[in-house]
Amino acid sequence: MKRTLGTCYYPEHWPEEIWAADARRMADTGLTWVRIGEFSWVRIEPKAGDLQWDWLDRAIETLGREGLKVVLGTPTATPPRWMLHRHPDMLAVDAEGRERKFGSRRHYCFSHEGFAQESDRIVRLMAERYGRNPHLAAWQTDNEYSCHDTTLSYSDAAQEAFRPWLKARYGSIEALNSAWGNVFWSMDYASFDDIALPNLTVTDPNPAHMLAFRRFSSDQVVRFNRRQVDIIRQHSDAPISHNFMGRTTDFDHFKVGDDLEIATWDSYPLGFLEDRVEASDEHKRRFARQGDPDFQAFHHDLYRAVGKGRWWIMEQQPGPVNWAPYNPAPLPGMVRLWTWEAFAHGAEAVCYFRWRQVPFAQEQMHAGMLRPDSAAAPALAEAQDVADEIADAPDVSIAPAPVAIIFDYDSDFAWTTQPHGKGSSYFQLVFDTYRALRKLGLSIDILPASSRDFSNHKLILAPGLMHIPESLKRAFIETSATVLLGPRAGARGVDLDMPVPLAPDIPGLELAVSRVESIRPDMPMAVQGGGSIINYREELETASNILLQLEDGSPLAVEGDNLIYMGGWGDQSTLARLLTSVCTKIGIGTVELPDGIRIRETETERFWFNYGAEPAHFAQRNIPAAGVLREALTDERAD
């Protein structure tokens, strides 16, 4: 698989006289891909039924004439203002009952059938016109589903769609009442028509009700996306993608990915560090101009799984952004490092957002590859360097990693519904585990919870996997891999009921979780030999072999057959001890990396990444500041 580069371009933002010069400059920089169109609805259709395609025809032709490949985005993330005259009730509604009004973007409810039909119409017209265009090489549906908290909508349209969804899932109102435990607080329903959305209740709604609404909302995203995909496929053979986001877990990306050929995501390392990474102020200061050493890599591995091996970065940060609490410029070399790290994790393409910084509207403070006056911004030279380097680089071939983590969006729905402690989140638990593995120099695959074949891996980790179907339990027992579970693995049934026998209830582990507690941030529990338990702890009744204990002698991690259960949320020190021990036992080599140094292996190469602001010397290797070192695995010599 050959590595390629691209950018995001908005011809409607610029005078047509400069389009050709822009296209030539993109090609001269070494770019292959140009994404356009995803916010263009009002220029395509300034008034209902008044279709103006000529400018887009010319833009695609201008880009294609320079050999650039077009990724065409469907424009449904930004319905024009006239759309609200047609469908005044199409707006999403937040949990407090307030409409999400026009004036920015993503102002629609996924459940509104009138808008969904308008979406079908514009996508069909676009696909009919451009589906066989020789310059069109890929599609993008919509833009950043869920951005700005737009998955959950408490609108009338959502309520009307939720009721038949519930009926299809449960069959009868009696079955729903039983599954939800509605006898509690006298909440039994006589009819599906009696069920409202779980907001504006006096106190907490039934957690099973909330979980069902989250699952429904996720399915509405899947449904909306599938309608676009089905229409495009009638008129085009080009692959279809969607650009997902970082730390966005309120819809099931794997289910959306099942309908796509390519998963893409939008990578903003500096923005995410301030906006989405849970870390100390010291950590954020140290990596303020580089980004977190593990956050991007986690999402690379996640979206490689969502895309079933095919994935891109559709938007790569090229400089300061406009939307985080603080928006520093990256260190020299970081744009190159981020690009190479994506390639090392199997990206087919990295596209920089955006080509030219726009001098107006909401994103005018967001840097591009060019300044607003068309002079080169610093990222342009780094992109040119990568383009020159990949011209001579071998193709990427990704081999299965020895270690895999299961990531399950439904478990995130359950944790979000019932966190049991302030700040506890499924994403953070999984990410903490991923970070601990990366610090040990390991490459990692991420798998969906639908996986049943683990033969390519030696170690499978499933922290926080709230509900474990019986078929997955059997797969864990039958695999030759070692499986590390917990905490909260198997802690709930499919509707958030507590199972009896008590969790985790897996043959091979003589274990029951007898009681659980959440822990204040200032009350960590010491572990014998070093480290602590934070956030969440389980009391274990066990006859299995004990691997780790708390200072008071209570069992913390136990093993039986090929299964290990961790009854608490370990800090990085505790996780490192446990994971090093397990890896050594099963023959996986580890190395304790300095802070900021990370490794990623492909089938033929090893990449060393230095997220530090200073050069690093480690294992007889000199790794430049904000730099990348590549070496062939066959002879261990650096390129």
Image (spheres, rainbow, N blue to C red):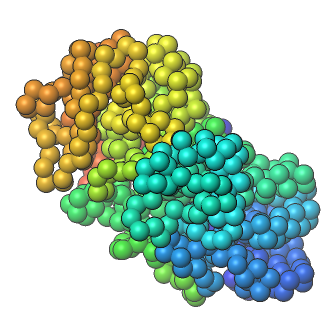
User: Can residue 401 be seen here?
Assistant: yes
Residue drawn where x is 53% and y is 76% of the image: 97
Say whether residue 219 is left or right of residue 20: left
The residue lying at 84 percent from left, 55 percent from top is: 232
Occupied quadrant, residue 20: bottom right
Q: Nearer the viewer, residue 107 or 235?
A: 107
Q: Is residue 550 above or below residue 273?
A: above
Percent of width and height locating residue 486: 34, 32
In the foreground, 288 or 325: 325
Residue 119, horizontal then vertical, whole percent: 79, 67
Q: Quadrant of the N terminus?
A: top right
Disc count in the image?
0
Q: Is residue 492 above or below residue 5?
A: above
In the image, what residue occupies the spot 46% across and 15% down? 477
Q: Residue at x 51, y 46 (%)?
A: 180
Task: Classify residue 146 as left or right of residue 435.
Answer: right
Please, which residue is most extreme toward the left here? 552
Residue 216: horizontal and vertical position, in percent? 62, 53
Where is 144 relative to 345, above or below? below
Residue 313: percent from the left, percent from the top?
Answer: 58, 54
Residue 126 visible? The answer is: no
* Residue 242, image quadrant: bottom right
Question: Quarter of the image containing the C terminus?
Answer: top left
Q: Is residue 239 left or right of residue 198?
A: right
